[in-house]
Image (cartoon, rainbow, N blue to C red):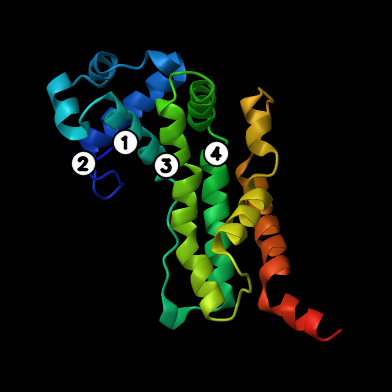
Amino acid sequence: MQLAVDVGENALTERQKDVLDAALALLVEAGDALTMTSVARRASCSKESLYKWFGDRDGLLTATVQWQASKVRAVPVNPEAFNLASLTAGLQRFASDWLHVLSGTISVALNRVAVGHAGSDKHDLGVIVLENGPFAMARRLKPLLQLGRDTGLLHFNETDEAFRTFFGLVVRDVQIRLLLGDRLELTDASIERDSLRATQQFLALYGAQTEAAEGGH
């Protein structure tokens, strides 16, 4: 879906952000019932503006999911000032953002609707969430992982495999428990603790010091 508007915090106008927030709120409340009319009514804007900005309902859904996913910030990559400290900080910040977004009411509701679509003829939202959720997270983190490998700080053969490992260490069973209705309380402190743990475990698996230690035996 080619959007008429570039979906990103710096690219969107404040009005467009308000519209996408309204669409997210409606997805939480009504799930599949989201329409261009209902979003226009909730956001107090015209349907003509929605069609101009987002194209059609699928375009609006895509923009809405991308807006939610954009809250997981990309990690700045500067090869000239890259070291183990910046790699560790980048991984930990990414993990923290990810857990904050993933555990929020909006993401839980969005993923529940998407899972329902994946098992029916109404597969559009499932595909949109998959492409702009996990797949987008991979595209956003891969430059950091690849730079870590290029500079000798990380050792792995496949970037996709390294990302999936990091995904598992960060998310664990949190997402499935939330989707199934577990009242899991994730505080800022627990998210920071879990983000640090996941980062340390990832570096223990793929860090240069791991390969050096193995080579010494």
Q: Nearer the viewer, mark 4 or mark 3?
A: 3
Q: Nearer the viewer, residue 19 or 32?
A: 32
Q: Mark 2 or mark 4: which is in front?
A: 2
State the residue in front, 61 or 192: 61
CA distance separating discs 2 and 1: 8 Å
Query: Which residue type does callout 3 highlight?
Result: Asn
Distance from Cα at disc 1 to Cα at disc 4: 17 Å
- Picture quarter with the C terminus: bottom right
Q: On the image, numbered disc 2 is attached to which residue?
A: 5
Q: Are marks 3 and 2 in contact (CB under 8 Å)?
A: no
96 left or right, relative to 75: right
Dot 4 corresponds to which residue? 102
Q: Nearer the viewer, residue 118 or 100?
A: 118
Question: SS of the residue at dot 1?
Answer: helix
Residue 63 marker: 1
**Secondary-structure class at tag 3:** helix
- Residue 113 in the figure: left or right of residue 59: right
Q: Which residue lies at the image location 54% right of the left edge and 26% below the top edge?
A: 115
Circle 1 residues within 10 Å: few <14, some 14–19, many ≥20: many
Please state the horizontal and vertical placement of residue 138, each as a whole percent of the image.
49, 53
Residue corresponding to mark 3: 132
Contact between marks 2 and 4 (CB within 8 A): the answer is: no
Q: CA distance from mark 3 to mark 1?
A: 9 Å
Quarter of image, res 201: bottom right
Q: Mark 2–mark 1 contact, CB under 8 Å?
A: yes
Between discs 4 and 3, the one toward the N terminus: 4
Q: Give the amino acid at mark 4.
A: Leu
Looking at the rendering, which quadrant does residue 127 occupy? top left
Q: CA distance from mark 3 to mark 2?
A: 16 Å
Decide: is 63 above or below 42: below
**Residue drawn where x is 24% and y is 48% of the image:** 11
